Amino acid sequence: MTDIASLRPIAAVLVSALAIVPILASGHRSNIRESWSVLAAVTMLGIVASMVPGVLDGNVYVTDFGTFLPGIQFALRVDPLGLLFGLLASILWLVTTFYSIGYMRGLGEHAQTRYFAAFAASVSSAVGVAFAGNLLVLFVFYELLTVATYPLVAHDETDEARAAGRKYLAYTFAGGVAVFAGAVLVFWLSGTTAFTPGGIAELASADPVLARVAFALLAAGFGVKAALMPMHSWLPDAMVAPTPVSGLLHAVAVVKSGVFGIARLVLDVFGPDLIGDLGMGLPLAAVAAFTLTVASIIALRQDNLKRRLAFSTVSQLSYIVLGLAVLDPMSLVGGLLHIPAHAFMKLTLFFCAGALHVETHTDDISNMAGIGQRMPLTMSAFAVASMGMAGIPLVAGFVSKYFLLIGTISAGQALFTGALLLSGILNIAYFWPVVYTAFFESPTESDEKPLVSGVLGGRFGGRDAVTDGGTDPDDPDEPEGHRDDHGFAPDHEGQGIQDDIDAAEQLDHDHGEEHEIDWEHRGWRGGESTWFMLAPILFAAAGSLALGIAPDAAVFLRIVRLIVAGATGVSV
Amino acid sequence: MSDLAPFLIALPILGSVVALLIGLARSETGWPVAVVAMIGQTGLAAWLAYQVFTGGPIEYVVGGFEVPYGIELVIDGLSASMIVLIATVALGVLAYAHAAGPRSNPFYGTYLLLVAGLTGVCITGDVFNMYVFLEITGLAAYALVASGRSGRSAVAALKYLIVGTVGASLFLLGVGYAYIATGTLNMADLAAKLAAVGYTSTLVQTAFAFVVIGLFIKVAVFPLHTWQPEAYAGAPDSVSAFIAALVSTVGAYALARMILSVFTVDFLAANPLARDLLVAGAMVSIVAGSALAVAQTEIKRMLAYSSVSQFGLVLAALSVTNRTALIGAAVHLVGHAIMKGGLFLTAGLVATGTGARTVDGYEGLSDRMPIAAGAFAVLALAMVGVPPMVGFAGKWYIALGAIEAQIWPLAVVILASTLLTLAYFARLIERMYFREAASVGDGPTAEAETGSPTGDAVLADGGRVTAGMYLAVLAAAVLAATLGVAVVEYGRLLEPTLELLLA
Amino acid sequence: MIDLVAARVHYLVTFLLLGIGTYMMIGNRNLVKKVIGMNVFQTGIFLFFISAAYIEGAGSPVLSSPGPYVSPLPHVLILTAIVVGVSLTAVALGLVVRIYDEYGTLETDVLREVRADE
């Protein structure tokens, strides 16, 4: 591996940071403002992409600014792992920028300038996290990311958003402190914090107790953003943010920076071998397995679509952590590959949720019956992505989950294999009802959902007919009012009763035979929404398919193989 | 070149006299005099600091009386950084005070006297001389706090005076014990003779206890901090910025000087209890200061309690006394002075612009005063220790120092201090950016009637926001955000000084 | 015991003064009396220094005739300290006058009530 001194890493970080100035300056002229965002996103993607061939050839691009603190260089290094995250963030930033434009304009949101500025700052920090050359530089950008995303979480300026923002800051800064403490310990134990594939050698000879403490602190600190249980509860609350934010930051940048931190920790700070010797892999894997199972179960009970997606994120992130913690080369590949795979799929899902919100003001799954008529393309993309989440072949999730399963088996951890399979089934259980509701039901007739209210689902598992046609007194879903299981404040837009009203207004009462209430039919040619939103959705969905159908052709798998070969010496 | 050292004290005193005399002829002429004097002082301080960092410590014997009988002025790396800091901050606050007032000549006379006192504490090499300069500092500070025209400032100043005098007196008592034990007052001489007397001698231990407790009062370490919140909150805005940035800082410098140069690290090694006293003071200050800061509704009081907590960090570094931690102490002293001075200036700016002096009054500030809100947010985040700003650099060194010394409880508290600081700043940031102002129309007037501590004086004095005020605030914010970069170089400059101090 | 006390009576007085001064500063409600307490406190310290200047068996470099000599340095120091003390008292009394003008009282508890309405 050769180091190439280059300004490209810092340029990639700075591009979007610099874009903040013109974005703020062109405040009210929204077209100019947005074109700066797009320009910055394109430039950044170009810079990052230009480094891909070099990195695949085994080079590392380095920008070194000299000593930052004694013994610590302020260095940016684009190695394969950094590139994986950096490339992902820059591709998806571009996509999300277009989507944001459609979304923010569609809703006429307030404070759009602040929104786009904070957005650019977040992406800049995320790329900084990706390219950080040592633990401390990573920490610097990790904290900046927290600061930059806070305005996005609290964007709504409602009590609920502020509470979510407070919770977000409290959780992530607490995590930051743990990371900081861990970094100080690592520096004290080994005299360096520079990332070294396969681990920092001096740590192996350090006091094992302190090394374990350092690992635990770092894992817990990154685990906050990676939403490991029991440190996950900021994530569902943060879903009050505008949907593009939820999508990019809470399914891609923020949570992935946590996962990425754990990947750095496992591969480049301690190294898989040392973690095995210290016995720290198993506890981490156990936490991850617990999280992915429990989060899936909780997701079943969420009626609000974004909240269901949030718990799905909690669960999917733990796939990645599990893959890393099992320490087998195959599982490492699976975990790392799940980073881009999950990003593409989850982004699709969030974009769909956002498009539904903008076009029909529907947020609760119970109000989505028949919505496939109204938004066919969107819901098809949703269906594809949710199949991927469940690990059905030909979509991205299958490849990474396959590697994960193989990895856990070859590491002899059958229990974890079981957890993965169980969670896969639960994935179907909480995604299929959404798709089923959208396409195969209409607002006037809805059926039982599999596993949620009837074991078999559909018309087969329906409850016994009631002779008077009234409600079943035992049925918890039917009583007057609305069972508020989503935890948002009752007056939150698109919640509970309010959502029912919003949704009802969108229904076309004159349409359909016999004056049946139904969604308006819109064709398959994009009449359902603006192309600002549809194109990103379709792109992300296509990305999920590309990763699933030809993983070797998409560059991510090659990068992942390179990372694992570098860290373990085993080529997969 | 070393002959320039006494001018550091003489120049501001001269300026102070000139300001008073000119004031007899024409009123409101103090500001230009003060500016001229401070520009000269800044140049002088920078030049001397350059000499020190390139050529080693400067020693100057006042009046030609031989050491250890005469009074000596000593400028080493630590004092050099302090004198530059004092001159720079004083100049910056002057830029702010031009419009914000107070405008009277006696005010600027006292202001320059305070600069003289602060500088004196930092460059003297004689413990009794240090007492005198501490009292000059104190006197000038009491008078400045009282320069707000309301009754509240007078009450605050009197409380400050009584508590501060007790602190200085206890310091003097400690000096008396040291004198009885050794028969000398020169710092270098004391260090040698105290070692000869023996660090476990009761006399020496008592001297240490009195000196440290006396200075704890000056630094405002919990629970000896009670004078501070009232004094800061009761003073006019320019004054509270100035004394919050410098007076406690110089107190902490005096403490460091006494511990390191006079009693030396060997004393701490010989008396574990003494170190425990410092560690305990540090931990309690950090936690209690933050907890009290969260409970405040008035901005300036909150910032004052924040100082209690931040000086806990400095004290923590002094109790650890290894090289890393001491660099951290120096960095944090400088960084804190800039950040806290900037925060007080911003608070003053906001109060002038909108009349808001309470936490609730800051709601929706980002719409009303975007630049002030931005500066406040940056300074607050720097104080929290968001990397790579200067607050982070100091914290990194201090935490690393505590871990190197393996004082684990202290290390945990230092790390947790980030969250504690966040606790009181986050609510402000949230209010500034994510809440609408309750009622923009009658907000300021209502505030002015009920919330303004210095009465109508401040509002009447400087009811308009000027470029000079913004300049001072922005300079502080930019320095706080960027000085972190210079920390490594600064640490390297301090190395020789610390080598001597820790030898 | 008596001897011991008699030999150190000045230290005893010193700390008695310090104690009285502290008590007056904390316990007394009148601001002027607080300032007096501060003065008493400082006087204790002055006494401490002065008494420490008497060193048994010490000689003087200039005078040769026998007799008890007193080290002049602490006296000089205390002269300075007295000057400082006087200025402090002056400033303190000035503040007291202003407080009285503003609130019409010097009792701390009344002052607190008046200021609570501010």
Image: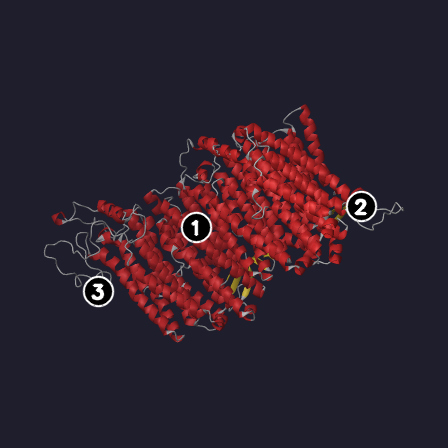
Q: Nearer the viewer, mark 1 or mark 2?
A: 2
Q: Is residue A183 above or below residue B3?
A: below
Q: Is residue B291 above or below residue A455?
A: above
Q: Quadrant of the C terminus of chain A?
A: bottom left
- Distance (Cα) linking label 1 and label 3: 41 Å
The extreme front residue here reads C2
Name the amino acid type tagged 3: Val
Category of crowding for the residue at label 3, using alpha-carbon neighbours closer than 10 angstroms: few (below 14), some (14–19), many (at least 20): few
Q: Is residue A337 in view from this perspective?
A: no
Name the amino acid type tagged 2: Ser
Tell me which chain the residue with mark 3 is part of: A
Task: Write down the residue under mark 3.
Answer: A455
The secondary structure type at the circle numbered 3 is loop
The extreme left residue here reads A467
The secondary structure type at the circle numbered 2 is loop
Residue occupying image coordinates x 35% and y 52%: A239
Task: Write down the residue under mark 1.
Answer: A149
Q: Nearer the viewer, mark 2 or mark 3?
A: 2
Q: Is residue A564 above or below residue A107?
A: below
The extreme top residue here reads B25
Task: Write down the residue under mark 2.
Answer: C71
Q: Are marks 2 and 3 on the same chain?
A: no
- Distance (Cα) linking label 1 and label 2: 69 Å
Front residue of B178 and B316: B178
Front residue of A561 and C106: C106
Q: Nearer the viewer, mark 1 or mark 3?
A: 3
Res. A195 mark: none
Tell me which chain the residue with mark 2 is part of: C
Tell me which chain the residue with mark 1 is part of: A
Name the amino acid type tagged 1: Thr
